[in-house]
Amino acid sequence: MDKSLQKMIENMSEKTGKKLEEWLQILDKENFEKHSMAVKFLKTDHGVTHGFANTIVTLSKERTNPPEDLVLNQYSGKESLKPIYETLLFVIKNFGEDVVITPKKGSVSLIRKKQFALIKPATKTRIDLGLKLKDVKVQGRLEGSGPFGTMCTHRIQLNNISDVDSEVIEWLSKAYETSV
């Protein structure tokens, strides 16, 4: 567990009025289908700030669907893409210790204070890297968001490890830097 997450869990009782285990029990009773619905519930019904609500829901989902299983399922039948995913994670982890990697059912969210990127195995031969780059025009490999809709502003299609080049790293870094 990274230091920032550990600190958040340690401060949870003081900041939210309940310990993590108490929040997890509350969510277990509700059984929300979608992450966003659970976050909204904690924020509106319990006055929890977005950061704590998102963390509580993420940790709740990890108990029933460990992150390794979610990623494993994403790449089932798409194993040739896993090295691209691992290369992206290696690059992103070097940006700073404040990156939270959140596997979901169909993608992996990369969050600083806000989500700045998404990694999604789109087909058996391609990963779509979604980026949040405000006020950046579509150019070259940097396409419109496509299937990501409003979750991202741009997308880069990656078919090989060699596609994770200096240009992609620069765009990722820019998305990371502007996500505060």
Image (tube, rainbow, N blue to C red):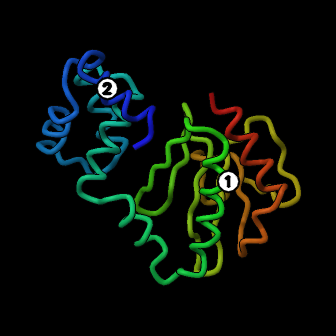
Residue 2 is situated, as x and y percent measured from the top left of the image, at: 44, 40
| Figure quadrant of the N terminus | top left
Q: How many marks?
A: 2
Residue 90 is left or right of residue 106, and the answer is right
Tell which residue pokes out farthest to the right in this image. 140
- Residue 91: mark in rendering: 1
State the image quarter where residue 83 is shown: bottom right
State the image quarter where residue 155 is shown: bottom right
Residue beneath the point at 64% across and 49% down: 92
Judge whether 161 appears above or below 175 on screen.
Answer: below
Residue 87 is situated, as x and y percent measured from the top left of the image, at: 65, 63
Q: Nearer the viewer, mark 1 or mark 2?
A: 1
Residue 106 is situated, as x and y percent measured from the top left of the image, at: 46, 63
Residue 89 is left or right of residue 42, and the answer is right
Query: In this view of the protein, which residue sits in the foreground, 49 or 168?
Result: 168
| Element at label 1 | helix
Query: In this view of the protein, which residue sits in the foreground, 163 or 129?
Result: 163
- Can you identify the residue that label 2 sits on? 43
| Element at label 2 | helix
Q: Point out the tag, 1 or 2, that comes first from the N-terminus.
A: 2
Judge whether 75 appears above or below 116 on screen.
Answer: below
Residue 116 is situated, as x and y percent measured from the top left of the image, at: 62, 42
Q: Residues within 10 Å of mark 2 (few under 14, many from 20)?
A: some
Disc 1 marks a residue whose amino acid type is Val
| Figure quadrant of the C terminus | top right
Residue beneath the point at 40% across and 27% down: 50
